[in-house]
Image (cartoon, coloured by chain):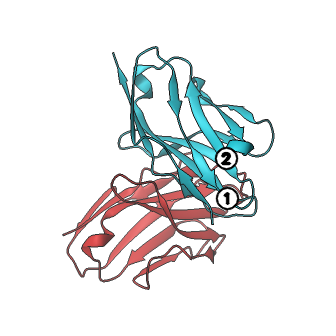
């Protein structure tokens, strides 16, 4: 069975600073990986996804993530944080023949002025 | 046109009561998913529909939970004899064909509170 860990339930960065949100997975075979963002009182919105094409994936709002098989990681980064990036971020995995996501516990990102 | 919608947005009920939560997926999406999100946690899978049939209901916690999608569009999640532990946000998602690479589009959720 797959599992996802997200190191750091809460991350704070200053506006303009680098954002790094960590995601590690456990799976018997390399899965597909997704990052979703959840703003208060809104549904989850897809940021980006890795589906076995390029290992460096670019998403919306300037975010990107790199799939590293040797490290079983899919960390999310953004070079310069903006106040509007404050939200909850979830990493999720799904097997190539799977039908549902397994989500991590989430990381709440705060952006300080 | 519109995204996934869910009604009601909030539901407060008493322990032991029956509730129904509704999900309207994106038009044309054959796959529909229900997840449950408890406070401070990531969503947990409940059930997946492909068309009208439940292709995977392995996430339903017990037989008090049941879901239907009779015409392959709208789905209803039904909870009998609600318990305080059922309190959570219930999320619905849909995807075009249910492939693992498909993006799942999520609704805003229904917040269920069992008193």
* Quadrant (top left, top right, bottom left, bottom right) of the C terminus of chain A: top left
Categorize mark 1 by other alpha carbons within 10 Å: few (<14), some (14-19), many (20+).
some
Chain A's colour is cyan
- Taking the image as shown, residue A35 lies to the left or right of residue B6, namely right
Badges 1 and 2: C-beta atoms under 8 Å apart? yes
Distance, label 1 to label 2, CA atoms, is: 9 Å
Pointer 1 indicates a residue of which chain? A
Above or below for A50 versus B33? above
Find residue A80 and name its label. none
Q: Which SS class for mark 1? A: loop
Q: Position of residue A78 (x, y in %)?
A: 56, 24
* Residue B84 vertical position relative to residue A73 in the rendered view, above or below: below
**Mark closest to the chain's N terminus, 1 or 2:** 1
Residue at x 68%, y 43% (from the top left corner):
A71
Could you say which disc has been placed on residue A72 in the image?
Answer: 2
Above or below B5: residue B18: below
Q: Which residue is mark 1?
A: A27
Q: Closer to the camera, B38 or A75?
A: A75
Q: Chain of mark 2?
A: A
Task: State whether residue A50 appears in this view.
Answer: no
Q: Quadrant of residue A47?
A: top right
Q: Colour of chain B?
A: red
Occupied quadrant, residue B70 = bottom right
Question: What residue occupies the far bottom of the structure in this picture?
Answer: B63
Residues B98 and A71: in front is A71
Q: Is residue B20 left or right of residue A104?
A: left
| Quadrant of image for the N terminus of chain A | bottom right
């Amino acid at each position: 069975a797959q599992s996802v860990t997200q190191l750091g339930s809460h991350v704070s960065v200053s506006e303009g600073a680098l954002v790094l949100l960590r995601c590690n997975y456990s799976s018997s075979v390399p899965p597909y990986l997704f990052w979703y963002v959840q703003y208060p009182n809104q549904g989850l919105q897809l940021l980006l996804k890795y589906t076995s094409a390029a290992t460096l994936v670019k998403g919306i709002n300037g975010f990107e993530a790199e799939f590293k098989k040797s490290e079983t990681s899919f960390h999310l980064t953004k070079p310069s944080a903006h106040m509007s990036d404050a939200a909850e971020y979830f990493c999720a995995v799904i097997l190539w023949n799977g039908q549902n996501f397994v989500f991590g516990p989430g990381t709440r990102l705060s952006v300080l002025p | 046109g519109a995204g996934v919608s869910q009604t009601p947005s909030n539901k407060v009920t008493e322990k032991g009561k029956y509730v129904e939560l509704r999900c309207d997926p994106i038009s044309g999406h054959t796959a529909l998913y229900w997840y449950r999100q408890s406070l401070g946690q990531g969503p947990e899978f409940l059930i997946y529909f492909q068309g009208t049939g439940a292709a995977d209901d392995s996430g339903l916690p017990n037989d008090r939970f049941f879901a239907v999608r009779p015409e392959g569009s709208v789905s209803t999640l039904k909870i009998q004899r609600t318990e305080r532990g059922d309190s959570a946000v219930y999320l619905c998602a849909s995807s075009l064909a249910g492939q693992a690479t498909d993006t799942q589009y999520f609704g805003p959720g229904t917040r269920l509170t069992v008193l």
